[in-house]
Image: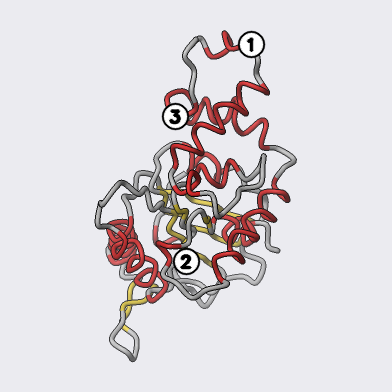
Amino acid sequence: MKMEPWEIKSDDSREVDTKRVFIIFCEDGAVEPAYFDLFKKEGLQVSTIGNAKQHHAQVDYATEYFRKSDLIEVNDHGQEVLKIDEGAQVWCVFDRDREPDDGKDSAFNDSIIAANSKGIKTAWSNDDFELWVLLHFEDIDPANEEFHNRSKYYERLTDILKEYYPEVDKFKNPRFNYYESMKGKSMFLRYTYQIMKGKLEDAIRRAKELEVFHQKVLKPSHLHCPCTKVHTLVLELLNE
């Protein structure tokens, strides 16, 4: 369900027990929105906006989304910030998606800083969201450079899915692999999410361990790899 900006506009008549509201901009248009929509429950309104671009473009997209409804103001420091209810949270979910010598390290780092300055929280992943999915199943060695790229996550998730679903004909694809077969909403919900159930605590623990590993030395966000901040959004959704 797409949320209209005016639904989170500050209002003096707002009741104390109004639902908690999350607006989540997702780079992906299928798996990420489908995943976060699963957290909806009574008292918690989750509105996902898919295909919201990447890095700076996503932050700009989110900013313009609220600007159109006059929900952006300029603070005393001359910075644009969101003008929303205290109980509402706005998040950008995007990936580093590194390619050899793509020159996008600064764009990735700056987009995180820009979002935070506007009051937008970020749940980024480096290299991509599938790292968060993989953490439901196994530990990741942050010193292993194979895990600096999403191709390794796809490889491991393919192996894991084949282990859980040995009858490969279920997928109607004898050359099944995660990237080609599981990046759609229906397949994610039907297969991948089903084996993620009951493993959320493990994923959060592993994500925190990666976070701590990279915090040992002060370094820019693009060097925090493998790393994902999705657990920070998940914990907020769980109100923990």
| Pointer 2 or 1: first along the chain | 2
Toward which corner of the image does residue 106 lie, by quadrant?
bottom left
50 or 102, nearer to the observer: 102
Does dot 3 land on a helix, a strand or a loop?
A: helix
Q: Is residue 76 above or below residue 180?
A: below
Q: Amino acid at mark 2?
A: Lys
* Residue 97 image point, x, y percent: 37, 48
Give the residue at x 45% y 47%: 128
102 or 14, nearer to the observer: 102
Toward which corner of the image does residue 190 lie, by quadrant?
top right
Q: Amino acid at mark 3?
A: Tyr
Q: Is residue 134 left or right of residue 240?
A: left
Answer yes or no: do the residues labelled 2 and 1 have beta carbons within 8 Å? no
Does dot 1 land on a helix, a strand or a loop?
A: loop
* Residue 59 image point, x, y percent: 33, 62
Give the residue at x 56% y 32%: 157
Q: Residues within 10 Å of mark 3 (few under 14, many from 20)?
A: some
Q: Which residue is mark 2?
A: 121
Q: Give the distance between the C-alpha atoms of the residues marked 2 and 3, in whole angstroms.
A: 28 Å
| Pointer 2 or 3: first along the chain | 2
Nearest-to-viewer mark from 2 and 3: 3
Query: In the orientation shown, which residue stands out farthest toward the front?
Result: 144
Nearest-to-viewer mark from 2 and 1: 1
Q: Which residue is mark 1?
A: 167
Q: Give the distance between the C-alpha atoms of the residues marked 2 and 1, in whole angstroms.
A: 41 Å
* Residue 48 image point, x, y percent: 46, 48
Q: Is residue 39 left or right of residue 145?
A: right
Q: Which residue is mark 3?
A: 179
